[in-house]
Image: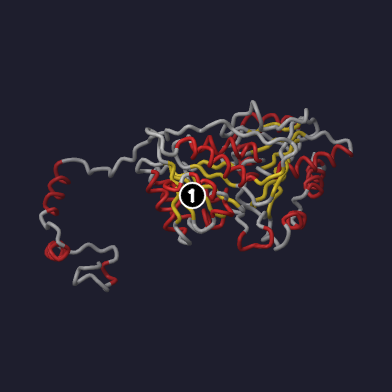
Amino acid sequence: GKGVSFMEGTPEYHGKAPKDDLYRQAMEELGGDPALLDEVRRLRAEGPLPKGRPVPQTVPCLDLGIPRTYGAEVKTDNRSAFGSALTDVGALNYGREGRTPLLVFDCDLASSVKTSDFAAQCPAWFIQAGIQEHATATMAGAASTAGAAALWADFGVFGLSEVYNQQRLNDINEANVKTVLTHVGLDVGEDGMTHQAIDYIGLLRNTFRWRLVVPADPNQTDRATRWALGEQGCVCIAMGRSKIPVLLDESGRPAFGEGYAFRYGEAVLLRPGSDGTIFALGAMADRALAARDLLAEKGRSVALYSVSSPLVPDDGALKSAAARGPILTCEDHSVRSGMGSILAARMTELGLSAPFRSLGVHRYGESGPSKDVYAAMGLDGQGIAGAFEDVLKKR
């Protein structure tokens, strides 16, 4: 009611429309045209109500470049791989006629979320919003409906948990924003439980358009980033903080390197097996490989799938796993609302049955080196191997 004498400072007008005479008085005080009310009533009487402003459904026009491939000798973090891919795409399109503007938003965390190189390469496309996450989520969403490709990178607890309603509204408004969450799960080191984003799958699961990608290593992160930047619609990419190994296939080559193209919804078989299956979410794949090696020492042959799209189960992979026998899911996320619950529900819908257990975050984690925090939660190689042995006992 700011600027209206009888409304300002009066809470009763929150959600209450003024009567005709007061409406006209308010419009006059605001410098508007009171006759608009009569025009709106005429339109309402003559036909169906307007459905609001249509949001253009456009695919960004960007050169996505050639993916980088990190070799077996490289150990880096997924956020650095994201930042490099983003900078590559920015450099290829910045200042080029006909290309969609790629606006990157930041909340004073550019060095941590690895967007500082993009800012240096594409200064006019970098927007420093300061520590105001709610406003930034709204700005990025609005920009994405106005002809720009918008990306916002922030810590998981700030980019989704803190601003869930704004991201929900971005979904309702059919925005085209890309949200990159770093420092998700237990992988925040000494920052502790207040900064452990362990609910991002559950939150986005509540929406109807958001897509979520949790890449397994730097190579998959690079390819998922380029894929997301070329997609229409809201996409979230979530990753941890620590440096991790490049995942290799059985021949010793990068599993997500040359010849691999990211496909949303695909679970990738990293290792075959006959005694059961482990589905590992994102960077948990490396720990699951360590668990698989421990199980192999005991004569167990375990298949391992790398899952990057937890909101969209891979039916083919689930059918193969159910036919194989015991199934263990492992994730750096709350077991109450994460990948395990989604896969279990989908198996029920498909009429599949197998001994099943979800392994994940079952309480708030400690503060300390990430390696120790994972071990305390039972999410290191030893803990995953032990959990799989427990599932085998259900046969």
Q: Few, some or many C-alpha atoms within 10 Å of disc 1 (few <14, some 14-19, many ≥20)?
A: many
**Most distant residue in the bottom direction:** 9
Q: Which residue is mark 1?
A: 152
**Most distant residue in the right direction:** 298
Side of 255 relative to 23 (left or right):
right
Residue displayed at 34% across by 43% down: 146
Residue 191 position, x and y percent, is 65, 62
Residue displayed at 56% across by 39% down: 85
Side of 172 relative to 307 (left or right):
left
For badge 1, the amino acid type reads Trp
**Most distant residue in the top direction:** 259
Front-most of 59 and 340? 59
Q: Is residue 356 visible?
A: no
Side of 161 relative to 137 (left or right):
right
Please, what secondary structure does the residue beneath circle 1 have?
Answer: strand
Residue 278, relative to residue 159: is it above or below?
Answer: above
Q: Is residue 338 visible?
A: yes
All told, the count of numbered labels is 1
Residue 56 position, x and y percent, is 34, 37
Residue 299, relative to residue 340: is it above or below?
Answer: above
- Which quadrant: the N terminus? bottom left
Front-most of 93 and 280? 93
Front-most of 65 and 211? 65
Residue displayed at 14% across by 61% down: 31
- Which quadrant: the C terminus? top right
Side of 11 relative to 280 (left or right):
left
Residue 286 position, x and y percent, is 74, 42
Q: How is the image coloured?
A: secondary structure
